[in-house]
Image (cartoon, rainbow, N blue to C red):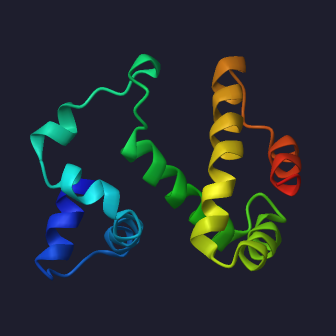
């Protein structure tokens, strides 16, 4: 979806609402554009802990997740946290970057423990930023 969306965006083709969100996140990460435009190479890439390479799809997906959380204020209170971080950091995108690690950690813990993410613990991690 990322590759197709970016192609549509660069060709000025109409975008569905979710595609517009994806295109916005890609546009905020110019370091990924050339890689995305490589097509099959991007799709075949492996991202293992040993490689030390960050997974761009995961990174951008976490941005999208945070934006959805903020838009819906779920978990309750996250919109306020994001607003506070955005003001302090001077940029909503920078605030999202700060929020990525706590989100990824919360999701990893939930998967490891075989249960739903702990929203209260997640919010506490965010408040500690």
Q: Nearer the viewer, residue 55 or 79?
A: 55
User: Which quadrant is the N terminus positioned in?
Assistant: bottom left
Residue 65 as seen in the image, left or right of residue 49: right
User: Which quadrant is the C terminus positioned in?
Assistant: bottom right
Residue 73 percent coordinates (x, y): 74, 68
Question: Quadrant of the rendered structure where residue 102 is?
Answer: top right
For the point 18% across and 59% down, which residue is it?
4
Residue 53 as seen in the image, left or right of residue 79: left
Question: Quadrant of the rendered structure where residue 110 is?
Answer: top right
For the point 64% across and 29% down, which residue is it?
108
For the point 71% across and 37% down, which residue is it?
106
Residue 89 percent coordinates (x, y): 72, 72
Residue 96 as seen in the image, left or right of residue 3: right
Residue 95 percent coordinates (x, y): 67, 66
For the point 50% across and 60% down, which residue is it?
64
Q: How many marks?
A: 0
Residue 104 visible in rendering: yes
From what the image shows, is residue 86 above or below residue 108?
below
From what the image shows, is residue 52 above or below residue 128?
above
From what the image shows, is residue 27 above or below residue 41?
below
Residue 1 visible in rendering: no
Residue 49 percent coordinates (x, y): 47, 21
């Amino acid at each position: 979806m990322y590759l197709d969306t970016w192609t549509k965006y660069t060709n000025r083709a109409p975008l569905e609402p979710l595609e517009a969100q994806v295109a916005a996140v890609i546009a905020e990460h110019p370091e990924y554009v050339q890689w995305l435009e490589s097509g099959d190479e991007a799709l075949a890439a492996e991202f293992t802990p040993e490689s030390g390479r960050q997974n761009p799809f995961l990174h951008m997906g976490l941005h999208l997740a945070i934006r959805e959380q903020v838009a819906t204020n779920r978990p309750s209170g996250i919109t306020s946290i994001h607003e506070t971080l955005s003001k302090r950091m001077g940029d909503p995108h920078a605030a999202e970057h700060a929020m990525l690690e706590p989100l990824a950690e919360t999701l990893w813990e939930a998967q490891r423990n075989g249960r739903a993410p702990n929203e209260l613990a997640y919010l506490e991690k965010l408040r500690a930023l």
